[in-house]
Amino acid sequence: MGMVGGGQGAFIGAIHRLAAGITGEIALVAGAFSRDGDASRAFGAELGLSPERSYASYTEMFGAELALPEDIRMQCVSIVTPNDSHADIACSAMKAGFDVICDKPLAGVLEDALRIEEAVKETGRLFALTQTYTGYPMAIEARERIAAGELGEIRRVAVSYLQDWLSREDDTKGSKQASWRSDPARSGESGAFADIGTHAYNMVEFMTGERVTDVAAELRAVLPGRAIDDDGMAMFRLDGGAAGLISASQVCSGAINALRIEIYGSKASLHWFQEEPNTLSLKRRGEPEMVLRSGAGTPYLSDAALAVCRTPGGHPEGYIEAFANLYAAFAGDVRDGGKRPGTPPGYATIEDGMSAMRFIRAANISSKNNSAWTPLAGIENQS
Amino acid sequence: MGMVGGGQGAFIGAIHRLAAGITGEIALVAGAFSRDGDASRAFGAELGLSPERSYASYTEMFGAELALPEDIRMQCVSIVTPNDSHADIACSAMKAGFDVICDKPLAGVLEDALRIEEAVKETGRLFALTQTYTGYPMAIEARERIAAGELGEIRRVAVSYLQDWLSREDDTKGSKQASWRSDPARSGESGAFADIGTHAYNMVEFMTGERVTDVAAELRAVLPGRAIDDDGMAMFRLDGGAAGLISASQVCSGAINALRIEIYGSKASLHWFQEEPNTLSLKRRGEPEMVLRSGAGTPYLSDAALAVCRTPGGHPEGYIEAFANLYAAFAGDVRDGGKRPGTPPGYATIEDGMSAMRFIRAANISSKNNSAWTPLAGIENQS
Amino acid sequence: MGMVGGGQGAFIGAIHRLAAGITGEIALVAGAFSRDGDASRAFGAELGLSPERSYASYTEMFGAELALPEDIRMQCVSIVTPNDSHADIACSAMKAGFDVICDKPLAGVLEDALRIEEAVKETGRLFALTQTYTGYPMAIEARERIAAGELGEIRRVAVSYLQDWLSREDDTKGSKQASWRSDPARSGESGAFADIGTHAYNMVEFMTGERVTDVAAELRAVLPGRAIDDDGMAMFRLDGGAAGLISASQVCSGAINALRIEIYGSKASLHWFQEEPNTLSLKRRGEPEMVLRSGAGTPYLSDAALAVCRTPGGHPEGYIEAFANLYAAFAGDVRDGGKRPGTPPGYATIEDGMSAMRFIRAANISSKNNSAWTPLAGIENQS
Amino acid sequence: MGMVGGGQGAFIGAIHRLAAGITGEIALVAGAFSRDGDASRAFGAELGLSPERSYASYTEMFGAELALPEDIRMQCVSIVTPNDSHADIACSAMKAGFDVICDKPLAGVLEDALRIEEAVKETGRLFALTQTYTGYPMAIEARERIAAGELGEIRRVAVSYLQDWLSREDDTKGSKQASWRSDPARSGESGAFADIGTHAYNMVEFMTGERVTDVAAELRAVLPGRAIDDDGMAMFRLDGGAAGLISASQVCSGAINALRIEIYGSKASLHWFQEEPNTLSLKRRGEPEMVLRSGAGTPYLSDAALAVCRTPGGHPEGYIEAFANLYAAFAGDVRDGGKRPGTPPGYATIEDGMSAMRFIRAANISSKNNSAWTPLAGIENQS
C-alpha cells in the first residue's frame, strides 16, 4: 500500500497506518506524505520506508510505482488528505490502476464526488471509504439483525453525532485539523455536517439497509465568525417509510465523540453508542432489555459480527480495531481482485459515499430554503 | 379537594389521589367520579367519602359544595377527565371560585385552551397543570443550574418521549385510555404529540427557562387505521437562539416511558432520563462527567431541588413523589391564597399550558404544510 | 396504629408514617413519640392526633388504648426507637395483645432478641421487622426467580452495603442518629454490621431462600476513638452449599447508600443495586444480559412482584414505596388476623430477625477469634 | 523477539504477537512454537518467519540465536507456555542473556517462582510479567491518583474476577486451555485463584501501591470431579492498614470476564470495571460522582495515563491496546538496557509476580486451615 497525506502530526494518517498494520495483510511500502519532498522522505524514513519510495507528490508516486516490478510495487492507495483533494488523487490513482481506500467524506463538494463515482465506473477499481464506525462488531450485529427482520418494519430513527472541540471561538485558530475543517474553501460545502454528520448519516443507511430519500434541515454557524456550519439538525425520510432525526454538532459542550443511534421498528428497537461500542441494546415491548456484547465465540452473535471479533467476550475492542476491520475487508477484496458479490462489503462503497454527499448538498439547499423537504435524488442538478 | 373524573379503574385519577395524599396537606372530601351517580357514589364510598359528597356531575358538585360552610366545603378541584372536557369543567370551577389543578394537556383543542386562559385571567383563581415530570428533584436541579448560568448560552436541545403501548394495530381497540387518546373527537387535534409530546415540550421550556418560537414538524399516523398521529418529530427554535429536536411516539417498540432530554450550552451540558430520575449528568468540555444524585441533605444541590427531596441521598424517589411535589406546591399556593411572586411555581402554569397548546397547533399546521417553519405566536389566528 | 418513638426530627419515624399512610389501610391514631409528655403531645398535635392519644410512655399508651372500645383503639404498634429498647416495648405490646411492626435490627443484643422471639411464640401476635429493601418489586422478583429455579443451584453470593456518613472522626459527635448508632451501650454489640450489615445479610437470605450457617468475619473500628465497628467484612456459607462475601461499612468515602447484591447460580446470575432499584439484571452464560424493569402490567414479572407495583412500567418507584409495601403486607395480615400460611410474608419475620442477630453475634465472636469460621446455630450459648 | 509456545490455535500467543506488533518497536524473528519441529516450522512460516528460525525447542532456539550476529539475533524472549514450564524456560533464557517477557502467573508452584526470582537476581536481565489489565490507561490513572493522595488513606478494597467458562462439568474436557488450567499437575497449586485471582490480586497491589500482608481464604472445587479450585474467596490485609475482599471464580454463570475493583479511602473512592475499561469513576462524599474517560489530550488525566493513550477522547481503546502497552514498556526498557529507575514500570515485575505466588500459596494453606489468617511473608517455608 502507498499512502497520500498523513505526514508528521496528522492524526488520521497515523490511525490508518496502525489499522492497516493490525490486519497483518497490508504493508506500507510507499508514501507521498507531504508536498515537501524532504519532509515526505524524512517521515517515510521514520516509518521504515526505503527513501526512494517516499515521494513529493502523488503523481510522482503513481508513476514511479507503476515502473516497479509488479510483485514489488504497491497495489493500492490510501488517501488521507483534506477533503478537497480526494477527487484528484482518487481519480488519478484509479486511472493508474490502483485500488483506493479513502478517508471520509468522499469529497469536499458534490461535483468532485461525482468525478470519483465516474472514475470508479470507468476503471472498475475497488473504492473503499473509511466510515470507521461501521467497522465495530456491534454495528455490524445491528445491521445483521435488522436485515434478518428482527426489528420488523423500521419506523423511527434517531441519530446524533455531537462533539465539543470547536465549542469556543478560538478553536478554529489552533490546530491544522480544526482550521481546514472550518474553512469552506478546503472542507467543502459543509462543516460539521460533512465532517461528522456523514458518519451519523452513513450509520443510519448501514444499519437499516435503507436509503434516505428526503431531508428537511437547518445548518447553523453558531460561533461568531464561523464561515461554515458548526452545528446542524435535520428530519429525514427513509425509502422504507421510516422517519428520522439527525443532529451533528461540534459546539456541544461536554460531548466528546458522542455518536449515538437508536432504531425503532414494529417489533423491536436497537440502541448503540460509539463511546461504549462493545454493547448493543435490543428492546422489545413487554420483554426485558437485552444487552448484547461483542466477543469471539459469543453464541448469539451473527457470523458477520463474529468474523470481525479479535478477542473473546469480555475483552473489549475499540476504535483502532474497528478501523482495522475496514482495512482487513479492503485487503481481502484487493487480494480477491474485487468485491465478493452478494455480501455486504466491510467498508463504505462509492454508493454509500455518494448518498452522503447528496444528503449534505440537499441539507444545505433545504437549510437555505426555510428547511423545506428536499429530495436527494437528482440534487446535483438543483441549485 | 374535590375531584372530577378518576372513577373506578382510571389510572391517572388514582395517581392524583395518591400524590395529593402524600403531601399531608390535601384531603379529598368530594368527587364527581362518574357521570353515573350510583357509580360515583359507590366509588366515593370506596375512597371513604361521605355519600352526600359523591356527585353525579361537576355542576352538581360545585353547587352543592358552595352551599356548605366555608370550613367544610372543598377549596379546590382536581380535574382528571379526558382532554376535551377540561375547558368546561375548569372554567366552571374557577367561576364558582375554586382553585383548579388539572391533568395535562390543557385541553383537546387550542380554542378550549383559550377559554381556560380567559377564565384564569377573569377569575384570578389559581390554575395548575400537572406536567408530572417537572416535579422530579433533578429536573428542578437542571432548571436551577441553567438559570444560574452554569450551561452558558443554550445552543442545542434534544428531547424525546417514546413509548410502545400503541405499537400494534389492535392497541387502540382495547383499553379506555387507549381508545380516547387515539380518537380525535375526544383527544383533540393531536394524538401522541398532545399526549406525551407536551410533556417533552414542557420539559424543554421548564429546564431552559426559554420559550419555543417556531416549529417545523412532521406528524404521522404510522399504524394503519389510526385517525390521529401516533408518532411525530419536529425541529424547533428557542427564543434565546438555540435549536432543538423533539420526537414523541407511541409506536416505538421497546420504549416504555422513555422521556429523555439533553441540553447543550456554551459552557456545559445536562442529560436527564425519566426512567432513572434520581441522577442528572453534567458534562463540561475537558472535565470528567459529573453525575449528580438527588437526596435530602446533598450539599451540592440547589435549595429548590432540596426542597422537594423527601429522603436522604441514596434512597431513591419516583414518579409518585414527583407528582406529589406538584400537589404540594399547589396546596401551598392555595393555602397562601395565590402564587408566591418572584419564584418559579412548582407546577405548570396556564402560560406553560398555552405555550404547549400553541406548539401542538403550530406543529399540526407545519406538518400539513410540508413541514414549513411555523411561528407559535398568533397561531390561533391561522388555519 | 400507635407509634412508639419517632418524635420531632426523627428521620425513620417520619418514613414509617409516610409509608403506612401510602398503603391507604393504616391510620395513625396514637403515639408515644417522646419520653417527655409535652413534647409527645405537641408532636402528636402536629400529626393531627387528638391530644388524649399522645402519650408520655408506651406503657401508658398500651394501658389507655386497651381501655378504649375495640373499634376505636389502636390495633397494632409501630416501634421506631433505638435498638436497645425494642425488646421491652415489643414484648410489652405483644403481651398487651397488639400486633407489632418494628424497625430493624431486631434488638441491640442477642439476649434481647431472644426475649422478643419468646414473646412472639407465647402471644402468637404478628411481629414484622422493617428490612425496607426487601419491599422493592425487583428484590421480590429476584426471590421469585430463584425460588422458581432460574438460577439453578446457588454457588456464590456477593453483597455489600457501604455508606460514608461516618467517614470522618467528628461524624459521631453531631446528630442524634449518628451518636446512638456508634455508642455500644445503646446500639448493641455491633455498629455498622448491625445497622446496615443486617440489611445486606437479610437480603441474602431473602433472595436466596437459604439460611447462613457459618461466618468468618473481621469487624473493625477504622476511625480513631470509635468504640464500635464502623466497618466490617466476612465470608459466609449458606445451607445450600454456596459461599458468600459480605461487607458493611459506614466509612467508605463516596458510598451514599450503596447496597449491592450479586447472586451466581449454576444456570444464571442476578444483580441488583438499591440506588437504581427499578432494574434487575439477569445474566446467563452465552446469552445477552437481560435487564428487567419493574412496573405494573409488565408481562414477564412474577405475580408477587406485580402485586407491589403501584405504577406502570417506566414510572419509577422508590424507597418510600418499598417501605409502604412492608406496611401494606403487615396491614393485610393484621386485618386477616395472622399471616397467610404458605406464602412468603411481605416483611421480615422474627425468624429472619433472629438469624441476623445470630449472624452479628457470630461475626463478633469470629472477629475476636482470628476470624475463625463460626457456626450461627447455638451461638447464644457461646461466649 | 523470539517466542516460546503460542502455536496454532493458542489464544494467548496470538494476543502477545498482536500486542507486540502494535507497539511498532518489536519484530518477531524467531519461535519455538511447538515441541514438534515440523509444526513449529509450519506455524512460523505462517507468521512469515524464515524457516531456520522456527525451532523445535527453546533450548535449540537460545543456542542457535546466540550463534547469530548480534544485530540479527533476537534480543528478548516471550514465554506463552503453560504455567508449569515458565521457570525452566525463563531461567534458561535469562542465563543465555535474553530479557524475558512472560505470561502470567509467574509459575505453577511457588518453588518454581523462587527459581525465576533467583535467576533474575543472578543475571540482572529484565523480567516482565503480562498482567494485562494494568496496561489500561484508566488502571494507570487510578494508580496515579492514589499515589498522589487523592483517596487519602486506603480503608477498604473489593476486587473480584468472575468468569463462567468452566461453569459446567464438561467444560474441563473440551479445549486445550480448559484442560491444562484445571489439571493441578500442569497448572500448579491452584486453578481459578492462580489463573485469574492473580490478576485481581495484582490489580489491588498495582492500584494501591501497597502489598498484601495476610490472607484468610476459602478455595473450593465447586463442580464435581474437579481436582483443583474453580472458585475461591478471601479476606486480606494491606500493609497500609486497609482490609479487602477478593473473589475469583470460573463457575459464576453470566460473568464473562468480570474483573471489577473498588478502592475506598478516607477522602474518596475509585471504581473500575474491565469490561468498560475506558471509564473510571471517582466518588467523594457530598460531591457528584466524577466519571473520568481515557483519551489522548484529556486535560485532567495524569501524564502516565496519557502516555499510553493512542486515540483522542471518545475513541475507545481495548484489551489489545492494554496488552500492547505492556509490550511497549518492555520494549522501551530492553532498548534502554534496563528499567528506568524511579518510575513505576509499565508491566508487572518479578516482585509483583512473587507477591502473587505467595498469596496463592498462603490462600491455599489458609483454606486448608479453617481459613485462618495466614501471613504471606515466609510462606515458602511453611507447609
Image (spheres, coloured by chain):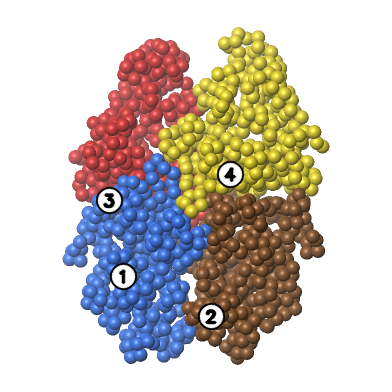
Chain colours: A brown, B yellow, C red, D blue
Q: CA distance from mark 1 to mark 2?
A: 35 Å
Q: Nearer the viewer, residue A361 or D319?
A: A361
Q: Taking C255 as reference, is D222 above or below it? A: below
Q: Which mark is residue D340?
A: 1
Q: CA distance from mark 4 to mark 1?
A: 49 Å
Q: CA distance from mark 1 to mark 3?
A: 30 Å
Q: Taking A358 as reference, is D146 above or below it? A: above
Disc 1 packing (10 Å; few <14; some 14–19; many ≥20): few
Do labels 4 and 1 touch, CB within 8 Å?
no
Q: Which mark is residue D242?
A: 3
Residue B45 at x, y percent in the picture: 60, 19
The residue wearing badge 4 is B153
Name the chain letter of the residue that bears numbered label 1: D
Do labels 1 and 2 touch, CB within 8 Å?
no
Q: Residue furthest left?
A: D381
Name the kind of residue labelled 2 in the image.
Asp
Residue B332, picture quadrant: top right
Do labels 2 and 3 touch, CB within 8 Å?
no
Name the chain letter of the residue that bears numbered label 4: B
The residue wearing badge 2 is A38
Name the chain letter of the residue that bears numbered label 2: A
Position of the C terminus of chain C by quadrant: top left
Q: CA distance from mark 2 to mark 4?
A: 47 Å
Disc 4 packing (10 Å; few <14; some 14–19; many ≥20): some
Q: Secondary structure at mark 4?
A: loop
Front: mark 4 or 1: 4
Residue C367 at x, y percent in the picture: 23, 45
Q: Tell me which residue sits at (26%, 81%) in the image.
A: D95
